[in-house]
Amino acid sequence: MTIIRSLVFGLCAAGLSSLAIAGGSVHFIEPVDGATVAQEFAVRMGAEGIKVQASGALMDGTGHHHLIIDGKPIAAGVAVPADDTHLHFGKGQTETTLKLAPGQHTLTLQFADGLHQSYGPDLSQTITVTVK
């Protein structure tokens, strides 16, 4: 098992290098940083220089979105947790609807490979929204 994990991590690190060199990035299309939103609101996620693809396979230059609520980007090579504050979009989705309590929240868009291992802070974006 350790050998397999080392091999997978090595593949992810190689993918990270090629994505970083290619200038890949992720961003929020909606909402924008500093927006005031209703308790239920739409989130649209974008990517440039990389291909959004369903999870399950490791393919160079591809991955899928994760949305972290009130958290920070995940270090490169670390699997994104699956819980109420780390939402996975492993089918390649680029849109969702969130429902949050009133107040200020951070949303971090984190791109990860086919095995949900983060490409790191360089392929993330964090915004702040105020829920009314």
Image (spheres, rainbow, N blue to C red):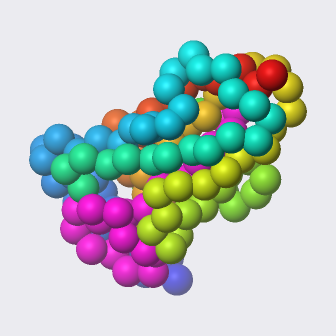
Residue lying furthest right: 101
User: 78 or 22: nearer the eye?
Assistant: 22
Residue 81: horizontal and vertical position, in percent? 66, 57
Q: Is residue 99 visible?
A: yes
Segment colored magenta: 51-71
Q: Is residue 7 visible?
A: no
Whether residue 45 is situated above or below residue 37 in the rendered picture: below
Q: How many numbered marks are there?
A: 0
Residue 40: horizontal and vertical position, in percent? 76, 41
User: 128 or 120: nearer the eye?
Assistant: 128
Quarter the C terminus occupies = top right
Lateral position of residue 7 relative to residue 44, left or right: left
Lateral position of residue 14 relative to residue 56, left or right: left
Lateral position of residue 68 relative to residue 92, left or right: right
Q: Is residue 69 magenta?
A: yes
Residue 100, located in which quarter of the rendered image? top right
User: 45 or 108: nearer the eye?
Assistant: 45
Whether residue 99 is situated above or below residue 127 in the rendered picture: below
Residue under the image location 13 percent in, 44 percent down: 21
Residue 88, located in which quarter of the rendered image? bottom right
Q: Is residue 48 magenta?
A: no
Residue under the image location 50 percent in, 46 percent down: 44
Residue lying furthest top: 34
Residue 38: horizontal and vertical position, in percent? 75, 31
Lateral position of residue 111 relative to residue 42, left or right: left
